[in-house]
Each structure stands twice: as C-alpha cells, then as structure tokens.
Image: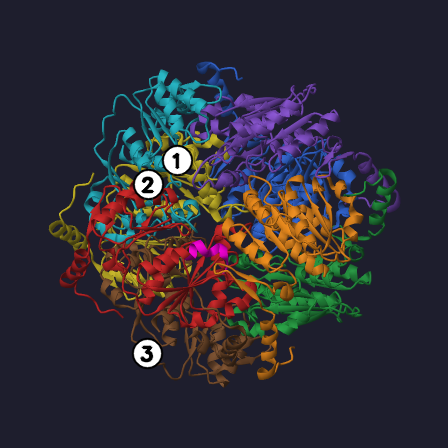
Chain colours: A red, B green, C orange, D brown, E blue, F purple, G yellow, H cyan
Amino acid sequence: MLEQYKKGDVDVDTIMTQLTSYEMADLGFAKIDLSRKARTGIPEVIFAAGKSIDQVEKIVMRMHEQHQDILATRVPQEMADILIKNIPSAIYHPLSRTFVYQPIRPVVKTGTICVVTAGTSDIPVAEEAVVTAEFLGNNVVPVFDVGVAGIHRLLHRIEILREARVIIAVAGMEGALASVVGGLVDKPVIGVPTSIGYGANFGGLSALLSMLNSCASGISVVNIDNGFGAACQAHLINS
Amino acid sequence: MLEQYKKGDVDVDTIMTQLTSYEMADLGFAKIDLSRKARTGIPEVIFAAGKSIDQVEKIVMRMHEQHQDILATRVPQEMADILIKNIPSAIYHPLSRTFVYQPIRPVVKTGTICVVTAGTSDIPVAEEAVVTAEFLGNNVVPVFDVGVAGIHRLLHRIEILREARVIIAVAGMEGALASVVGGLVDKPVIGVPTSIGYGANFGGLSALLSMLNSCASGISVVNIDNGFGAACQAHLINS
Amino acid sequence: MLEQYKKGDVDVDTIMTQLTSYEMADLGFAKIDLSRKARTGIPEVIFAAGKSIDQVEKIVMRMHEQHQDILATRVPQEMADILIKNIPSAIYHPLSRTFVYQPIRPVVKTGTICVVTAGTSDIPVAEEAVVTAEFLGNNVVPVFDVGVAGIHRLLHRIEILREARVIIAVAGMEGALASVVGGLVDKPVIGVPTSIGYGANFGGLSALLSMLNSCASGISVVNIDNGFGAACQAHLINS
Amino acid sequence: MLEQYKKGDVDVDTIMTQLTSYEMADLGFAKIDLSRKARTGIPEVIFAAGKSIDQVEKIVMRMHEQHQDILATRVPQEMADILIKNIPSAIYHPLSRTFVYQPIRPVVKTGTICVVTAGTSDIPVAEEAVVTAEFLGNNVVPVFDVGVAGIHRLLHRIEILREARVIIAVAGMEGALASVVGGLVDKPVIGVPTSIGYGANFGGLSALLSMLNSCASGISVVNIDNGFGAACQAHLINS
Amino acid sequence: MLEQYKKGDVDVDTIMTQLTSYEMADLGFAKIDLSRKARTGIPEVIFAAGKSIDQVEKIVMRMHEQHQDILATRVPQEMADILIKNIPSAIYHPLSRTFVYQPIRPVVKTGTICVVTAGTSDIPVAEEAVVTAEFLGNNVVPVFDVGVAGIHRLLHRIEILREARVIIAVAGMEGALASVVGGLVDKPVIGVPTSIGYGANFGGLSALLSMLNSCASGISVVNIDNGFGAACQAHLINS
Amino acid sequence: MLEQYKKGDVDVDTIMTQLTSYEMADLGFAKIDLSRKARTGIPEVIFAAGKSIDQVEKIVMRMHEQHQDILATRVPQEMADILIKNIPSAIYHPLSRTFVYQPIRPVVKTGTICVVTAGTSDIPVAEEAVVTAEFLGNNVVPVFDVGVAGIHRLLHRIEILREARVIIAVAGMEGALASVVGGLVDKPVIGVPTSIGYGANFGGLSALLSMLNSCASGISVVNIDNGFGAACQAHLINS
Amino acid sequence: MLEQYKKGDVDVDTIMTQLTSYEMADLGFAKIDLSRKARTGIPEVIFAAGKSIDQVEKIVMRMHEQHQDILATRVPQEMADILIKNIPSAIYHPLSRTFVYQPIRPVVKTGTICVVTAGTSDIPVAEEAVVTAEFLGNNVVPVFDVGVAGIHRLLHRIEILREARVIIAVAGMEGALASVVGGLVDKPVIGVPTSIGYGANFGGLSALLSMLNSCASGISVVNIDNGFGAACQAHLINS
Amino acid sequence: MLEQYKKGDVDVDTIMTQLTSYEMADLGFAKIDLSRKARTGIPEVIFAAGKSIDQVEKIVMRMHEQHQDILATRVPQEMADILIKNIPSAIYHPLSRTFVYQPIRPVVKTGTICVVTAGTSDIPVAEEAVVTAEFLGNNVVPVFDVGVAGIHRLLHRIEILREARVIIAVAGMEGALASVVGGLVDKPVIGVPTSIGYGANFGGLSALLSMLNSCASGISVVNIDNGFGAACQAHLINS
C-alpha cells in the first residue's frame, strides 16, 4: 500500500522538517513548546491543575515575553488573581476557570461550532469548550439546558444544530444527549461526559460509558469534563 | 408515627397470618413455595440457570402434580425438549428461552403493559418480559426497535406509550431509551438494561448506569437482561 | 403487532399534542419546563447540586412569579437561608436538604406509600422520599430502623407494609431489606440503595448490586441515595 | 444568545422538515430507517452481533428490494455465506467480518482518511474502519504496524499522516499511538482502542483509558474495537 | 505487652519446633507438605484447577504411597476417571467436583457445622463445603434452599441453626442469607458468596460485597465459590 | 436430610422462642434491640458514622437508662466530648475512636484472641478490634508491627500466635500477613484488610482481594477497616 | 540540570544515530524491526496471540530468511505444528506455549536469574520467563512451588535466591510471594502476577494489586501472566 | 532441578545466617528493623502517611540515637517542622515531602539513574525518586517535562537516556512515556504512574494500566506515585 521511502535521502528530509519546526523555551521544570501550533494546529496551553502558582506564573510570564497568546485551564481564583496582577489586560472566566490573554483576536473561521448542554450544571464544562474554541479562532454558538428529559427543548433548536460545522454535546448523568443529537444531524458530534450527578454516576463514568456506547454513529468522546479537548478537536475539524 | 403493637396478642396474630399462608413442597434440594402467589402476588417461578436438567424436571413435575401453573426462565433448548416430553401441552419460547404451562389463561387485567425495545437485538429480553407479564394475567403491547438513533420512530408511537398503565423500556448500548420515554409520558417506566453491545459496554453495565442516572424522574431499573423481574413489578403495579 | 399509523395525518396530530403542551420559561442558562407536570405527571423539580446559589435563586424566583409549586433537592443550608429570605413561607428540611414551597397542599390520593429504612443512618435519604411524595400529593407512612440484623423488627410491622399501595425500601450496607420485604408482600417495592457504610461499600455500590440481584421478584431500583426518584415512581404508581 | 423561536409557526416547520424526511420499512422486529442518510449523513448500517441469521437476512433482503446500498458489520462467516447466496455480487471481508453490497461505487471525496495501527493484531478493527470509510465514499490510506515500541516506524511515515484530512489511530495494549500521532500532526485524530492484549488489559480498557487521558489535545475516542464508528465520524469530518 | 524473647537461645528453639515439623515430598514441579496438618490443622489438599491431569495424578499417587488421606477439589470428570482407575476405592462427588480417598473415617467431633444455602443453584458450592468438612472429621448438617425470598423457609429451621457450633451460609445473587442468619443466632457465621446469578452479579461480586457489608456482626466471608475454605475455617473453629 | 417439622405445633414454639426474646426501646428514628445479646451473643453496638451527635446522644442515654453496657464505634472526638459529659465514667479511645461504658467488667473467657498488625499505621483498626473484644469479655494479646517485609519479626512471636484460640490479622497494603500467619498456625485466622496505603490500593481493596485469595486455608475476611466485626466473630468463636 | 544541546549540529547526529540503526523487513501487514536488538537489547519477538497462523508463519519465515534467531510466545499447538514443519530444528515448549529457533546458543552471562513460583499452577507463566531469559543468553535457576502457605519451603532455598543477580517471583492468588522474597534478599525482584485462582481473583487482579502494594521496597511488577516481559527486564538488569 | 538440602545441618545454617542479621529496636507500636539494610540492601525507611506526628517523632529519635541515616517519605510540612526542631541539620524537601538526615553522604556508585518525567505536574513524584536514590548512594540525572505530546523534546535527550544504567519514567495521564522510552534504549525502564490528570484518569489507574500493557518489552512498573519504590529497585539494579 505505501510507497517505500528510500532511506538515506528522504528520512533526513522528513526529520529535518520536524526538527526545524521545533523551538523551545526551557524553564528547567518545564519546556514550553513554542512551535506546537505550527506542528499540531493548537498552541501549547497551560493545564494548571497539579502545578503550583509559582510554576504557572513563571510559565505565563515566559510565554508573555515571547509575545505568545496565552490560555490556561483549571485555574483557581487565587492563581488567577496573581496572573491578572502580572498581565492586567488578561481575562479570567471564573465559571470555567480559564485564563486568557490574547491582545489581538484571531480571524474567525467560516464554520460554527455548536456547544449544547443537557443541564445547567454542565455549563462550567461547556464554557471551557466555548472559551477554548473562541481562543483558537472559531465562531461558537451555545445552546444550553436542552437535555432529553424534555426532548422538545432540543427539537426546538434543531435548525441551529444542523447549521453547525461540528457539535460539542456536554452532558452528565446518563449522557443521552449525545446519542439523540447524533441521530438528528449529519455533522460530527463530540461528546463531553461531565462528572455532574451522584450515586452510581461514579464521577462521570456513567455518562462516559453512555457516550462510548452510543447507538448513533458519528459520535466520538473526550475525557470526562474535558471541554478543552473537545474544543481542540472541533477546531481541527473546523480548520 | 407507628402505633405500638401490643406484644403478646398481636404478634402471634401477625405471625399466624404469615404462617398459615405457608405451604411448601419439599424436594430436599429444593423447597417449592406453594403459597408465594398468595403472599407476594407472584407464584414461584423456576430460574433454570445453574440448575441441572434433572433438578428442573423434578421441580416442574412436582408443581404439575400440585396442579400449579408453571413458568420457567433461562431454559436452554435441550432442557425444554425434556420438559415438553413430560408435559406435551406446555409451550417453549426459544427466543426468550421461557417454558410455560398454563392450561387456563388467567383473566386479563384492564390496564396494559407496554414493552418497548431500542433495537432488534434487545428482543429476547423483551420477550421474557412479554411472556412473563402475560403469564401473570396482563395485557401486553410490544413496541420494538424504536431506539433514539432515530427519535421519530419513537415519537410516531407516543400515543401507544401514553395509553399504557406502565411501560417497560428494554435497551442495551447506552440505554437512552428509558430517559427519553420517561420524559414523554406520565406513567411509571421500568428500565431493563440489556447486555447487547461490545467494547466498553461491560456486559450491560453501560446501559445499567445510564438508566440509574437517568435525568428523567419516575424511572426505576431492574438487573441487566432481567425481563422477568421487570414484568413482575409491572404486574404488581397493574394489579 | 402495532397498527400502522398513516403518516401524513396522524403524525401531525401526535406531534401537535406534544407541542401544544410545551411551555417554557427561558433564563438563558436554564429553561424551565412549565408543562412537565402535564406531560409526565411530575412538575420540574430543581436538583440544586452543581448549581450556584445565584442560579438556583433565579430559577426559584422565576417559578414563583409563575405561581408554581416549588421543590428543590440537595439544597445546602446556606442556599436555603437565601431562598427562605426570598420566600419566607417556604419550608427547608435540613435532614433531607429539601426546600419546599407549596402554599396549597394537593388533594391527597387514596393509596399510601410506605417508606421503610434499614437503619437510622438511612433516614436522610428516606426523608427526601417522604418530602417528595407528600409534595406530589401522596399519603406517606414511614417505618424506620427495621433492618434485617433483627428481622423481628420488620415482622412486627408487616401489616403496615401489606396495606400500602407501593413500598420504598431504603437501605445501605448490604441492602438486604429490599429482598426481605419483597418476599413478604404483594406490592411493588422500589429499592433505594444508600451510600451509608464503609470499606468495601464503595459509596453504596454494595447495596445497589444487592438490590439489583435481589432473589425476590417485583423489586426495581433507583440510583444510590435517590430518594427523590423513588418517590416520583411511587407517585406514578399510586396515581 | 439564541433568538427566541416563535412557537406556533416555526415549530411546525421545524418538525415538518424532520417528519417529511422520515421513511421507514417496518419488519415488525425491525424498523429500517430509509431516510437516515439524508438526516445524519450515514445510511442505516446493520450491526449483526446479537441478531439471528434469519433476522439479518430479512433486513438485508428488504433493503435490497428498496435498492439500498448495504453494509453489515460483525457478520460471522456462516451468516455471510447465506447472505452471499442471496446477493452473489456482494462482498464479504472475513478479516473485518464486514458484508458490503454497493453496485455503484460512490464519488470519492477529495480529502483522505489515514488509518494507522500500532500492531498486526489491530488490523481486523482497522479494516472495519477502512471498509466503512470506503463504503461511505472516502479515499482511505492505511499505515499499519507502526506502534511506539519502534517510534521511527511511525516517523518514517509522518508525511503521509500530515497529508490526511483526518486520522484514525487504532491501537490496543497501552494505546500510546494516538497520543504520539496527535503530538505530530495538525489534523483531528480519532482513537480506536482495541481489545488486543492480555492480563490487565481488561478487554481494551487500558487502551481506552490511555486514549481518553491523552496528553495531546485534539484527540477524541470511540468505543473499544469500534472501527465502524470511527469511520463514520471521519466521514462526517471529511464531508 | 510482649515479653522480650532472648535472642540466641529461644529463637533457635522456636525455629527448631517449626523446622522439625517440616516433612516434604518433592516432585520437582510440586512440593507436597506432609507436615501441614500438624502445623495448621489441615492437611495439604490438592486444588486441581490450573493443574494438568498428569500433574494431579502424580501428586495423588505420591500422597497415596505416603499413606496420606487425599482430598482434591475442582476435579473435572475426566480427571476423576483417571484418578479412580488408580485408586478404585476413592470416591468422586460430581456435583461438587471433589475427589476423596480416606480409607478410615476420622473420629467425628462433638460440635456440628450447619451448611445453609439460599437456593438450589448454590448446592455445588455447599457440597464442596460439606465434603471438605466431613473429610476433616466434622459432623455436618445441611439445610438447603432457604433463601430470604421466602423468609419462613428459614424461620422453620431456626432451631437447627441455633444448635450448630458454626454456620456456613452459601448464597449467590444478593447474598442476604448471611445477614439474616447472623441476626438470628449466637454462632459464628462464615459467608460463602457464589457466582450464581446474572447481569450485574459480576461473577459473584454482588453477593461478596453484600456479605462484607453485612449489618449483622459476627459474620466473616471467604472467596466466591470457596466452599473448601469455609469448611477449613469452620473445622478450626470446631476443633 | 431435615426432619420435617409438623406445622401447627412446632412453628408456634419456634416463633414464640424468637418473639419472647425480643425487647425493644423505640426512639422513633431508632429502635434499640435490647435482646440482641441474648439472641446473637453480641449486644447492640452503636455505629456512629452517618448519625448526628444528637441521635447518638439520645441512643446512648436511652441505653444508659436501661442499665446497658455501651459500646459505640467510629465516634469522632467532638461527639465523644459530649457523650463523656453525659456519662463521665465512660472511656473514649481516640486512636480507635471507640466509646465504652461498662461499669462492671465481664468475666474473662479462658481462650485468648491474638490481634496482629502488619504495620504501625494499621494500629487504629487493630485497636477497634482490641477494645471490642475486651468489651465482650475476652482476653486479648496484641502483637503489632510484624509485617512480612521482615518475616523474622513474625517468626519471633510464633509461640504467642500458636497459643491463641483465634487470631485477628490486620494489614493494609498487600495484606500478605494473613496468608503467612494462616500457613503457620492451626487456629482460625480472621483477616481485616485496612485502607492504609496509596496508589493502586483503592481504599483497602488490594488488601481485601489479597486476603480473599489467600493460598492458606482456614482464613476468612471481614470488611475493610472493620476491626469491630472481626472482634465479634472472634468472640463467638471463643465462646 | 541538563546542558543545553546546540540545535542544528547535535540534533542531526542524535537522530542519525537513531536512524542508521533502523533496518526493517516490511510485510505490509507487519514491519519486522531488524535493528531492535541493537537499539533496545532485545530482538523483535513475535507475540502470536491475535495473529492468524498465516501471519505468524510469514513473519517467522521472513525472519528465518534474514538468519535471525526466533522467539514466538502465546503459540497454540496447531500453530506450532505448522511452524515446526517449516523449521524442523526449532523447538516448541507446550507448557509455556513458546516457539524457539536459535541454532547457536548465545554466550551465557555471569549473573543468574532466579525464577520462583508460588504454586504448581503458576509454572506455565514461569516457563515463559525461563525460555525467554535463556533465549536472551542468561543462566536461569528455577525454584518452583514455594508459596507462603508453607513459608519454610521458601526459607529452605533462601541461599539460592541470595546468589541470584535478579529474581522473578511468579504468583497468583494473593501474590504474597513477591513481598516475602523482597523482604529477604538484597536483589531486585520482578513480580509476575498470574491469573491462577478463582472467585474474587478477577483474572489475576488480586495478585497484581498485591504486588503493586507490596510493603517490601525494591519490587516492581509486570503485567498479569507476562513471563516474557519479566524475563526481558531481568535480562537488561543482568546485562 | 534443585539439589536437595540435607535437613539437620543446612537448615540451621540457613536460618542462623538469617537470624544473626536481625537486630531490632522495639517501640511497642513499631519495631525498627536495624538490619534491613544488611539483608535487603535498603535500610528501613519511614512511610509517614497514616502515622501520627508523635509516632514518627519517636521512630526518628530512636533511629537517631542508633546513629542511623534517616529517610522519611510522605511527610507533611507540620510534621517536618517538628522533626527539624529535633534534628536541625536534617533537610526537608517540600516538593517531594521527604525528610532526610544523612550527615555523611554515601560513596556514589558508578552507574547513573536517569529520572524522566512527562510533565511538570509529575515532578513531586519524580523528586521522591531523586531524593531516595541519592540517599541510597546513587548518581541521579533528572530529565523533566519531555512527554510524548512533543516527542522531539524526548528525542533531543536520547543520549542522556542511553548513558544511564537504569531509567525511571514518571508519567501521569496516559503514561505513554514509559513505552516510548522503552522502545529507544537498551536499559531497564521502571515506570512510575502518577495520579496527575482528571476525568477517567481514576487516580492514576489509566497511567498504571498503560504502563502494565506497554508494547515495549523490558519495562516494569511500581505503584501509582511510588517514586520511593522505583528508586529502591533502581538502586538494587545499580548495585
């Protein structure tokens, strides 16, 4: 199936392409990948959970020096306060706990990303997706609280869903929203299970399994509460 | 809240009521509870899984001698062949693997039990519910293959669902059918998760968790593939 | 089995019925389903877990403006304090963490719902069921602390159980109460596993699995600690 | 955010659009959704697992009468033999256990779908994706046996990956392939965990968790061994 | 609390006692512990699962040469046939799949071990306990099929339970039998969960968790289907 | 096997014996079983987890009025302070969080119960067993910190173990202590897995599974951290 | 910490070293990594599970043409028969299901690898380790059936263990062998949990968790039944 | 295989060797194993989690009196403050929460241990490995934040990895780092899964399963977050 590459010549080229696109800022405890956007379409984003305030602050400031746009997720309020002190024109979204510094908004793409949620409690995760997708230069349409316990809430908005290029379906509990949406539209649906619920919800496992086992084809799933990852893939689809 | 029962007198009565309703046929390895129907509304039913053909045959014949109606579930074909040889007028349903001997059909109740399935593969479990509910004297309306991957299949039959006294929703994979039905009707819905599916289905666990975490209120759940149990509860509700 | 609906005419009717029964109050982040009671027999109830105080307050006040009865579950004390300030005649039950505003009590139905608990620690979940069932217009009889470690405690109250229209059995640890009750009465039993226990209890999983695997027929199960859901189904059965 | 739809007028239109697109062939035990392709971009495909040979045969023949293209997955050899006897010009792929009848090949889209596997044992799942994607009218490029135990095998083919519109990464064991690919390209990556492996693999759970927890952004996941679902989403992305 | 042992002298004694009681027959692939009975009160018993017929045959014959009593568990029929050919006076119990060779029955102890089962399907596991306990020289009283779905079946036999020195409660499904028995008697109860059941039974996990979480004190548990282990502990209690 | 009881006469006797031994103090939310000791050999003990301070206080005071000995487990410090204020001569053990009021020590039985722990971190659970066993009138010998990472620590104390009537082996992490002890002595061993550890310990699951799968016969297991339950069974064995 | 590599020059060298060591035989469905031994110290080994006989035969014959030593694991008897027909001087070990072709035995290293098993049933896994380690040129000493149910069996062989360079401890059930060995020697211990056992063994999970939670330091673990992997690491340690 | 040891003579020697190497400091609640280093190559290290400050202080001071080097892991800040007050020249590493007192640094071994981490968040676990390995007298080279989301970060440092005697790979999320490293070097790799991540990470389970199922041979795994254990085995390999 594959044409056999000649080893000597072509490998070096292949590798060269890869290597020249690699620029790094080394902080010792962290290595900021400055060419990740060129390589993967998505710049390095700071996942703040598990990092100290001091570490995040150093990474943010180094990126700032490099004139990079900055997105940090899972940023608690006290960390945000310190970051904002350093970069007063940055914005902190407390609901989704995202920190954004992007002085020049990117050119917005043609296609839209529709973010639907089953319930009000799923909104923090949905907002992480919204903020991320907008940061990456996408036009986002939110449709919130249209879960299947009242299916007409969803049917009323079916036209909006059908006009999107890609749909992110955010739902906890039994996560049935992704399946129902997937059966109604001809667009790729990315399911985001949320940890909302209780009892045999097991921190989002019930919604995750539901979405993985969806009887509707054309659905894929990201990790529980991973609004960021869903937005990244939606962005690549929309590119 | 509770009036305190006087001990001597009332206890004995209470217990007497209980004891007099107890009749048993003892086979040594099994004790057939001949008064279970009087006590719980459901006669003793033979769960054939894990029992030898010889054991089931002995239980069936003893019940036959006692002029009891007989229902056995999880009966494999070879066991059924031997039972039918003993009681030629009995009926074996190969799809649901149920064995029924009931020479005089019971008077049928007014309310109907509606059994819906998400897909064709869920039908064996649904049929166990249908056979059981009819054995117990209920009027049953099956609505098969109306899963949420094409929600209009279900919406087309909404009137049938609304006319039932109780609904049994049988679904594998992500089990979203129970939630969607529960959001459309004002009747109790009993979810039966099935082990249909593959991958992270874990033998029906995904559908079970989905149904337990349903965002629609008024839904309860029985064990995976337990069409029999769902029919029993539906019968008690319909009584 | 099913009479084939003629497409053009009947579908529209079916859908029309559905649509005309749909009234919604849209708060942006939440869509209050004002016709849910007409459709499903149970009005929209606020599940407060995962929602901010501000969100719950807005939903409650909008429902209040619409002259709706209000039930909110999983309401922490500090949220209740604010809600009560808004609607002083509402009631907060701290044990079950439920908030109720229902100026005119509904006409009570004939049948009773009996709520039994295995132990004292199961009472908060049982109280959620009691408050919900009464809110929905049912007569409720509580029978608390009658677990199977002393089976006579249960046998002493057998008459009360037998007089109920439907029984809610609330139990943690090994959840055997549901099976034992199910073997003694001819009424539908809804099991509510609770997260009470420790060690290999796994947050109520042991009781959940016990109840799902009950050897007594006629038992169905709701999610762990879901007193609300059990009461909803009991209410539909009792209607 | 959303403009409020006027209820009377627009709802009817919305629903009408939906309903007119609904055509069904009813077999009693199954309802073939003839308008699914128009609605969701993917025609109804037969998931043969859990269905009897007789049921699948009836569904296939009804679709054949309707002049539909036919794809059936999880078809065992003995079922295929019978289907081929009915439609001799159909094709059975034994490795992926897929049955295809498509007399006129669809016009092929511009973008390509690249299907990569970690090992030789993952090929059956990958072939299900290949057959499905081609059935849906896509150009597919397979790159097999390039797992991370020898990372240069993958680096040698990096150009092929970068030229694709979307990549399906099929891997069992620890499923690291999806993460490594995701870190090298700017295309959406759909991970398909496979059940290949042993020991603490738990039927593909290890690969599933790996892919869900990928440190590379832009990756989404379908169910274990679900080559079909991955191809469906890749097709929608490529449309 | 503990008196400090003097090292030189006492340690050697301690160890000597241990060493002199150690006699072994070495077969290379297996080392038969001929002094296990002296040391632990229970002789070496052959667990045949996972061993080849050839290996078991060699172990049995070597023990026979040493004039040892022989008990082998999990012995399939074809293995038993070969063993019986070697030792015609041995006995094979097909229900419990145990092989016993014990030409001289041991003196029976005073106390009795009562083995209760919830259902007929639990009998194979119960029989493993019965055979083992009798092999070890105990008087065993079986009480079968007295599960809690009909609690009076158990109450009718309460006197027998109360007269035992120790009770083995064998139950699958929800395993409630152990709790109910534990709440009725003042004897140690050893629960044996069985893998009987289906659905969310998970191979006996539901019964195992039930018994571990029993609300009755004085209950301990052995592994799923481990009738042998329960009998061993019951024997040590009865000694 | 069982002699058939004649129904009328004997049943009443059986039940009478049971009923006359039943005395209860009803607090509404709790029913104190004053005859549990006569029936099961172990008096009602208060499991304080999940109960409010107010509830526990009421139960304790009611038992005190009835001149009962009192044992409460899982009692946090602040609850203990209030209880001690009510009954100043009671004792609180902070390590095991047990509250004891027993003005007259019971007559001590002949046999001893040996409580061994693998490590220092297992001592709180072991102390719960020690306090409970002493409360029930047993002579207890503790042997702490003799885990298998240094097997000689255990071998040095082998004589103490061999002199006990029953051994409680308390261990977290991999829980190997129970197996090693079980292979060295001819006494029943009750394993208590503890939740000590981290990582893939899963709250004591690793130790629990280890002990259930012990290769030494004669071992049974109680729930994770359930020192109380182990002591109860040890007491019944020692009685 | 790390000296900063200069990009242009050194990277190319680094990569060149890597690339020149890469030789591959491409079979389309498989890519044989002929330089894996030079790179990782272990040649490419065929994991036959999940591969068809035809695929394995092609891989083996291609390696044979390249004059490579051949090791294939998880080879069923019927596959071995065909391979032996192709290479009559190869050897098949039926117990461990390994296929070996190595005409010239490698020079044996100085240090020995000791492979200990807990029981007879663990021997197939242990033999996979023995065959692999010998294939890689190591001196192997097996010590079988020395599990902790009779700790002296192990103590008798302590000298052999202490003389090894590295120890592989193979055990199922509760896997305590690894901890006990780890506490007795100053050599690295690699634990191999086996799937031997039943009940709550969960296919080796109990032994896996035991070994991961070992209280002895210096122990690492490979996958369940992975004798091959343990031998590979032991070989690298011994090199 | 094994030469049969003569019992009388050799056993005593074997045991004597073992016993004479046993020195213990008994604190009642803890027994400090002063000869563990001589026996296992690693001195007794204090695992502070689950121990009270008072207990740890007593153990540390007793070891100090015995002129032992001291390493304590999982030491919270407040415990460290008290220990430092007792031994002012000791050092506390807050990132890894390790406490070290080692007045004379051990002679450093020739081989180096390379500790690689996937991300910044994995550093605390990696530092536990670094501190432990240095305490045991090893030369350690850290290479941090080189996860597979940017594979070139790792390829740039390949020479450092190849020069090590043994590699510890610390990674959370999907843990792919261990597999990629294992495929690039001919040194033993010890994987340390970390609990870093969220959603379906399950406290490190995803990384643990990934590493156990690694497609690269020569990798073994220690418990989640167990930097200490990895360092111990690396030390034994390096000795």
**Above or below — where is H231 with respect to F95?**
below
Picture coordinates of residue F123, whole percent (x, y):
52, 27
- As shown in the figure, which amino acid type bears the numbered disc 2? Ile
Q: Which residue is mark 3?
A: D108
Specify the quadrant of the image occupied by residue F164: top right
Q: Nearer the viewer, residue D40 or H27?
A: D40
Q: Which is more foreground, mark 2 or mark 1? A: 2
Question: Residue at the location (44% across, 42% down)?
Answer: F200
Q: CA distance from mark 2 to mark 1?
A: 59 Å
Picture coordinates of residue E182, whole percent (x, y):
69, 38
Q: CA distance from mark 3 to mark 1?
A: 68 Å
- Secondary structure under tag 3 reads loop
Q: Is residue H76 found left or right of B230 in the rendered image? A: left
Q: CA distance from mark 3 to mark 2?
A: 52 Å
Q: In this rendering, does residue B44 appear at all? A: yes
- As shown in the figure, which amino acid type bears the numbered disc 3? Val
